[in-house]
Amino acid sequence: VSRHPAANNILRIIRLDKGVAADAVRHVLARLTERHAILRTRLFTEGGRKLQSMVSVEALQPSLREFEMPAVELPGFLSDERDRAFDLSSAPLWRSSLVRTEEGDWLCLVFHHAVTDERSAEIFLAEFETLINAVLQGREALLTDVGWTFADFALHQTTDVDTILRSRRQKQILEQLPGMAEELARVSRSGRNLESAFQLVAADTPAPLGDELRLSARRN
């Protein structure tokens, strides 16, 4: 059984104030794209390996298509948008449309599952609402700290030893343990991700440094 190429698409719609300026919506989408690196991610294959990369903020500005249509045509439009496949090698892996009808204005958002899930979509919608209200009211919006980001996750999965040792405290710990940096590099090259590599090395490290190294791996 073959899957539809758009089977992993997630559709979300937001009802907007009628007549909302498209530039205001674009501004908010740009803020969110800058804030969340996952929204600038693409997937590609190189040398037989499946890879992902993040496009810079400067190189990617989200597009917003604008449509006017009778309200009766909106369900069909949303269905077509949801079923339109993405080119996974080209960021962004989400798209937006501003649809104006006689019954109101709507923001149509379609995400590929590679860059969002149900919880992430909820966060996006909540942050969009906070930002668009602030823009329309002419005030600065305060968003909570992102915390654990996709960029952190990508770093967490790396097998590049220089990047692994970039954490200052981890490097300080390893400098107190002769030979452990080389051991970490060896474990990492075996294909383990960053956390499992640190956990394996920490298992052979006496307390209290071993305990701190394990906690550091979980936070990194």
Image (tube, helix red, strand yellow):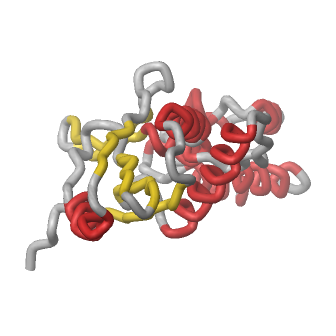
Q: Position of residue 189 (x, y in %)?
A: 45, 42
Q: Is residue 82 above or below residue 166?
A: below
Residue at the extreme top: 58
Q: Is residue 85 above or below residue 170?
A: below
Q: Nearer the viewer, residue 164 or 103?
A: 103
Q: Nearer the viewer, residue 109 or 93?
A: 109
Residue at 63% across / 45% down in the picture? 132
Quarter containing the N terminus: bottom left
Q: Nearer the viewer, residue 108 or 201?
A: 108
Q: Is residue 167 visible?
A: yes
Residue at the extreme bottom: 1
Asked whether, in this view, residue 50 is left or right of residue 102, the answer is left
Q: Position of residue 201 (x, y in %)?
A: 66, 51
Asked whether, in this view, residue 172 is left or right of residue 42, the answer is right
Residue at the extreme front: 102
Asked whether, in this view, residue 133 is left or right of residue 114, the answer is right
Q: Position of residue 131 (x, y in %)?
A: 67, 44
Residue at 83% across / 57% down in the picture? 211
Q: Position of residue 88 (x, y in %)?
A: 26, 46
Q: Is residue 220 visible?
A: no
Marks counted in the figure total 0
Residue at 20% across / 56% down in the picture? 84
Q: Is residue 176 above or below residue 10?
A: above
Asked which quadrant contains residue 178, the reply is top right
Q: Nearer the viewer, residue 142 or 151?
A: 142
Residue at the extreme left: 1
